[in-house]
Image (spheres, rainbow, N blue to C red):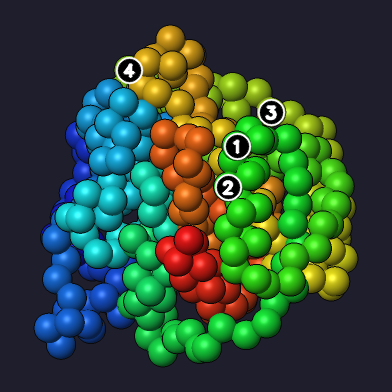
Amino acid sequence: MVGLPTTVASRAVAEDAKPADADAPLLAGIRAAEARGEVRIVGKTTLHELAFGTTGINRWAGTPVNPIAPDRVPGGSSSGSAVAVAAGEADIALGSDTGGSVRIPAACCGIAGLKTTWGRVPLAGVWPLAPSLDTVGPMAANVAGLARGMALLEPGFSIGIPGPVRIGRVHLPADPRVDRAVDRALLASEMEVVEVALPHWEEAQAAAYTLLEHEAWRSDRHLVETRPDAIGADVLRRLQAASRITDAQLAAARTELDRWRATLDEVLDDVDLLALPTLWETPPTLDEVSSVPNPRVRGFSVPVNAAGLPALALPVPADELPVPASLQLIGPAGAEATLLETGLVVEAAVAAR
């Protein structure tokens, strides 16, 4: 953002950061709306350091307080954006999503988040993590807010009247209470839902993490080599581990991900969207992750990034849990409008319960 430094919530970056000479191109629609008096930029938010973590905990820049569950993590990496929306400090926020960094904090904070199709939103001026996976998307309290956020990122974007869709329900190992909440929301929507198998998820997840961490090392290696003392311990450990990924491991991961993309293409030939939880379980408490060397919020997210597909995270009621569950809908490339239109149906159905 012109006139302000980009620090990525890292002391290693902040100490040498200079105010930007120009806005990142993705801000053009927001600036135009601002000039028309339609929006007001209220601030920049913090995040998990270097956008490389899922808890949102940042011991240097500070950890945003989860407004719906102050004892639990806000989720990462786009923690501050999710908290700003959940706390009512912003109607719309932007976040980056490389392995779940919009959807995971949205799920932790009980709001909606949209991971966009890879390449749809320009990334010039955005601090890179893993360029072949990086995306930027909106976060808001509800689907209407996400649609407005997309229109700011991509002027002319709009959604229409929701139409019939065929949803493929994917079951992966998750807390049964989360699964029940997702299934109740889908049932209430009265849309066509069929069971589908999604083989090779675990293999795709492992391969996607290999690729993500390899590219993260390439993006931030210079900081590790010059300012290791200024990087948080959790992020530093991950980057150092990523430095040891071999060419053979990377090649195997890319082969696995080619198979994964073909699998998803085949499954999405039979259904319009896929449905599964955003998170495996309830977001952990701050106490639960305090003694873990490399804590993570466990989500069903990074294989979606590896395929470059868009995905919606939408809060749904979960009476058995301390916070709402989060339904994730995944669509084919470019299906953001369909995802949001379908999300409107689900949102209205659960609100009427």
Q: Secondary structure at mark 2?
A: helix
Residue in view at x 35 percent, y 37 percent: 74
Residue in view at x 22 percent, y 77 percent: 31
Residue 1 appears at what percent x and percent y?
23, 62
Q: Amino acid at mark 1?
A: Arg
Residue sitting at the far top: 291
Q: CA distance from mark 3 to mark 2?
A: 38 Å
- Tag on residue 245? 3
- Which circle's residue, 3 or 4, is located before the other in the chain? 4
Residue in view at x 38 percent, y 80 percent: 151
- Tag on residue 229? 4
Q: Quadrant of residue 185?
A: bottom right
Q: CA distance from mark 4 to mark 2?
A: 44 Å
Q: Nearer the viewer, mark 3 or mark 2?
A: 2
Q: Amino acid at mark 2?
A: Ala
- Which circle's residue, 3 or 1, is located before the other in the chain? 1
Check the image and report above or below for 126 versus 343.
above
Q: Secondary structure at mark 3?
A: loop
Residue in view at x 39 percent, y 48 percent: 110
Mark 1 is surrounded, within 10 Å at the Cα level, by few (under 14), some (14 to 19) or many (20 or more) other residues, namely: some
Camera-side residue of 216 and 298:
298
Q: Is residue 240 left or right of residue 39?
A: right
Q: Which residue is mark 1?
A: 177
Q: Which residue is mark 2?
A: 181
Q: Quadrant of residue 285?
A: top left
Camera-side residue of 320 and 91:
320
Check the image and report above or below for 120 versus 324.
below
Mark 3 is surrounded, within 10 Å at the Cα level, by few (under 14), some (14 to 19) or many (20 or more) other residues, namely: some
Number of numbered markers: 4
Please report contact status of discs 2 and 1: CB closer than 8 Å, yes or no: yes
Q: Nearer the viewer, mark 4 or mark 1?
A: 1
Camera-side residue of 304 and 344:
344
